[in-house]
Amino acid sequence: MNVPVWVWILSVGITVAFLIFDVIHMARHPHTPSMKECLRYLAFYVGAAVVFGIGVWVLAGHDFGLQFFAGWLTEYSLSVDNLFIFLIIMSKFAVPEKLQQTALMIGIMIALVLRGIFIAIGASLINQFAWVFYLFGAFLIYTAVKLAFEGESDDDEYEDNAFTRWVASRFPATQEWQGTKLFARVDGSRVITPMFLVILALGTTDLLFALDSIPAIFGLTKEPFLVLMANIFALMGLRQLYFLIGGLLKKLVYLGLGLAVLLAFIGIKLILHAMHENTLPFVNGGEHIEWAPEIPIGVSLGMIVLILGVTTVASLWRTRRDERTGSEA
């Protein structure tokens, strides 16, 4: 896929401009978004992603269009799982409800920058060392097994990551909220505020999730531009999704299991791709033999939709059954 430099600049420029405008607007008018506002923004972001995907389909070919949609759906579903941790972080730091939008938005901006760095590193590794797909695939399968057997998480299980703890212990801080300010002056000394620590926790925690999501999307497309845009569209709507379905997340009881199946599928796809592309020294004297099957992107997209659909339906059925059983008891 040949993407002109001006397309990269335009795409990133529009994203940055929109994020800066959004942050400034929220900082000046902190509030808790209404259901109508969340739905309006979410519809815009989802619609923009669909339009972008159609544009890729028309201009670059249906195969690249399918790659984008598969990557976007995967990143979006993994981002939904992140919301559980975001809810815990907000609760742990006792973030005032009207300030949560700003904290989420700035945290998402940090996550986008860090993911952009990860994507650049991943793309460079793939271009120079095709065997890295073996490592990506094995890591995703390991993560899938761990996710499938870790069980339901508890709010008390969350602990600040090492970097957040180091910052909190290294720099003077105040426990008093100062609105959306990241720094404040207390008794003549400059200190960091709880908002600073919350944003740091959100951004760095998302980076840990990127360790799963970036290899996963590279299993669906090797185009850095599509990987970046899929991540942008997935994260851009995350703030509205947080307020819109925060209470409904508890009903997705099989989300962890569904994501485990999804990651395992992509991990297997990555390993098959590596076997298809790489020479194996113990096969026919090390000659390049394309003997491993490739999973077409259309099949991958179908599997992603099927896994997420079954996960959602099964979760809602289980929740409704439990509620009915509880009311009868």
Image (tube, rainbow, N blue to C red):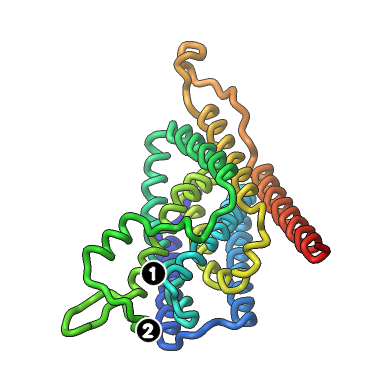
Mark identifier at residue 179: 2
Q: Read off the residue under disc 1.
A: 198
Q: Earlier in the sequence, mark 1 or mark 2?
A: 2
Amino acid type at image mark 2:
Gly
- Residue 122 found in image quarter: top left
Q: Is residue 311 visible?
A: yes
Residue 47 appears in the picture as rendered: no
Pick whichever, 329 or 301, lies toward us: 329
Q: Position of residue 198 (x, y in %)?
A: 39, 69
Q: Position of residue 260 (x, y in %)?
A: 60, 45
Q: Amino acid at mark 1?
A: Val
Say whether marks 1 and 2 touch (CB < 8 Å): no
Question: Relative to residue 203, is residue 60 depicted above or below?
Answer: above
Structural crowding at the residue carrying mark 1, measured as other residues with C-alpha within 10 Å and reported as few (<14), some (14–19) or many (≥20): many
Q: Residue at x 45, y 69 (%)?
A: 15
In the image: residue 154, left or right of residue 109: right
318 or 323: nearer the eye? 323
